[in-house]
Amino acid sequence: MGTGKRLDGKVAIITGATGGIGEATAKKFLEEGASVMLIGRSKAKLEETRGRLSGFEGVSGFVAEATDEDANAAAVSETVKQFGGLDILMANAGTEGKNNPIESQTREVWETVLGTNVIGVWISMKHAIEPMKKRGGGSIIAVSSIAGQIGFPTMAPYIASKHAVNGIVKTAALELGEFNIRVNSIGPGPISNRMTQSLESQMNPDDPSAAHDLVTTLIPMKRYGTNEEVANLASFLASDESSYCSGSCHMIDGGFIAA
């Protein structure tokens, strides 16, 4: 018998599950009645995250690098084996890279950022599609960024990668609509978590707090967002409440890109 929760009976995969947004989303999905497979590249961090979520039933974990196609395919197979199917994919694994002007960027940074943020998203989508078709539909959510809508000096690899995520989402939505598989991205602005702190430190190594204050002035709501606020948006897009939403990037940025 159903619980009446938003995601009752749904099965979700979350990549990058050990990060701030990933863990907050896992917690939200579990609270809403879903079973969740956490995917992360670090076994130790994955075990720590699972430990913090141990009060919930229906949570499991799988170690896989975002760019390792065989491991991600195995993670999907294990999800179906453990939970009976797949309804939701949150393609959240990402890396910020290193800030440098274009002429100072290295091929290594480009390949790392594009590998994780673009190829990784495609890999996770690729292997989620068939089990979703078998369920009669599903919801794929890719984590983009305000960086998928704007430019920003010294961040070319990251900016390019998040623009690419939105392109994948639009294409996948066109391909999968007839199968009742919805594909969307979410576009976080500055969020209070490790990645944003890393970017602040790169913007102003001597005084990251000054970078934080500067960025805050650019946000109409004059504050950073939280991991939990992003998780709330992901929960809506994962649920049947968003049944006619597909092919878009849903911003969660305090009005940043409206300026």
Image: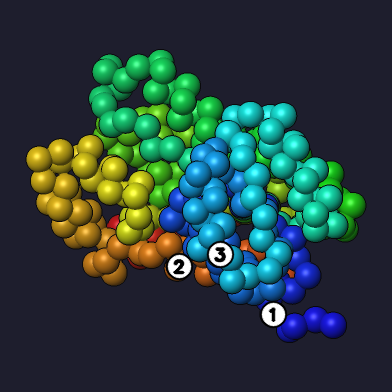
Element at label 1: loop
On screen, residue 204 above or below 250? above
Q: Earlier in the sequence, mark 1 or mark 3?
A: 1
Could you tell me which residue is drawn at 48 percent across and 47 percent down? 45
Rendering coords of residue 198 (x, y %): 29, 43
Amino acid type for the residue under numbered disc 1: Lys
* Mark in front: 1 vs 3: 3
The reply to whether discs 2 and 3 touch (Cβ–Cβ < 8 Å) is no
Residue bearing mark 2: 228
Q: Quadrant of the C terminus?
A: bottom left
Dot 1 or dot 2: first in sequence order is: 1
**Cβ–Cβ under 8 Å for marks 1 and 3:** no
* Contact? badges 1 and 2 (CB < 8 Å): no
Where is the N terminus found, in terms of image quarters?
A: bottom right
**Label 3 belongs to which residue?**
53
Tell which tag, 2 or 3, sits nearer the viewer.
3
The relative height of residue 147 versus residue 118 in the rendered view (above or below) is below
Identify the residue at horizontal 24%, vertical 67% (top origin): 222
Q: Residue at x 58, y 34 (%)?
A: 65
The residue furthest left is 206
| Residue 33 visible in the shown view | yes
Please tell me whether mark 2 sits on a helix, a strand or a loop: helix
Q: Could you say which quadrant of the image residue 85 lies in?
A: bottom right
Q: Could you say where residue 171 lies in the image, as x and y percent from the top left?
A: 68, 41
Q: Residues within 10 Å of mark 2 (few under 14, many from 20)?
A: some
Q: Amino acid at mark 3?
A: Leu
Per the rendering, the mark at residue 5 is 1
**Percent position (x, y) of residue 166?**
56, 43
Mark 3 surroundings: few (<14), some (14-19) or many (≥20) residues within 10 A: some
**Drawn side of residue 200 relative to residue 235, left or right:** left
Q: Is residue 140 left or right of residue 27?
A: right
Residue nearer the viewer, 253 or 129: 129
